Amino acid sequence: MLRFILHYGIHFVVPILIAFFFFKEHRLKVSLILLAGILLDVDHLLADPIFDADRCSIGFHPLHTYWAIAVYFLMLFWKTTRIWGIAFLIHMIADLTDCLFIRFNF
């Protein structure tokens, strides 16, 4: 249960809090973009099975590779891609928590 709350809390609560506290003038727009970071999970459709609760997404799915994460990090350096970069990195942090739960058998 803790794993579920933490994972989806990071996916849905953290983006809203970041928008609320750091992007006050554009809270709604930034919230929606940050929440749209969940769209990275479209690459799960390429896996068989599509969903496996005991599979670490990081390094497995194409949009969850270390190369992709490096691109998301680089997106932070340009104003036009910064919000999307934050969204994608939040997504990676949420998935990393799952990986840690799997690895350490919490």
Image (cartoon, rainbow, N blue to C red):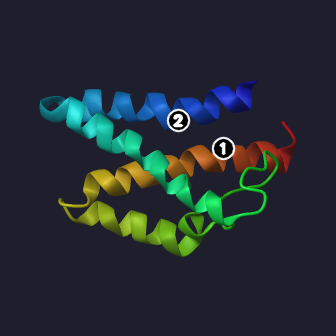
SS assignment at label 2: helix
Residue 23 visible, this angle: no
Quadrant containing the N terminus in the rendered view: top right
Dot 1 corresponds to which residue?
Answer: 97
Q: Please name the amino acid that badge 2 sits on.
A: Ile
What residue is rendered at 36% in x and 51% in y? 86
> Which is more N-terminal, label 1 or label 2?
2
Residue indicated by mark 2? 10
Residue 2 horizontal side relative to residue 90, left or right:
right
Quadrant including the C terminus = top right
Residues packed near mark 2 inside 10 Å, few (<14), some (14 to 19) or many (20 plus) = many
- Mark 1 nearby-residue class (10 Å; few <14, some 14–19, many ≥20): some
- Residue drawn at point x = 73 percent, y = 50 percent: 51
The amino acid type of the residue labelled 1 equals: Thr
Horizontal arrangement in the rendering, residue 15 relative to residue 20 (left or right) = right
Q: Position of residue 73 (x, y in %)?
A: 40, 64
Q: Please identify the quarter of the rendering in which residue 24 is found.
A: top left
Vertical arrangement, residue 39 with respect to residue 2, above or below = below
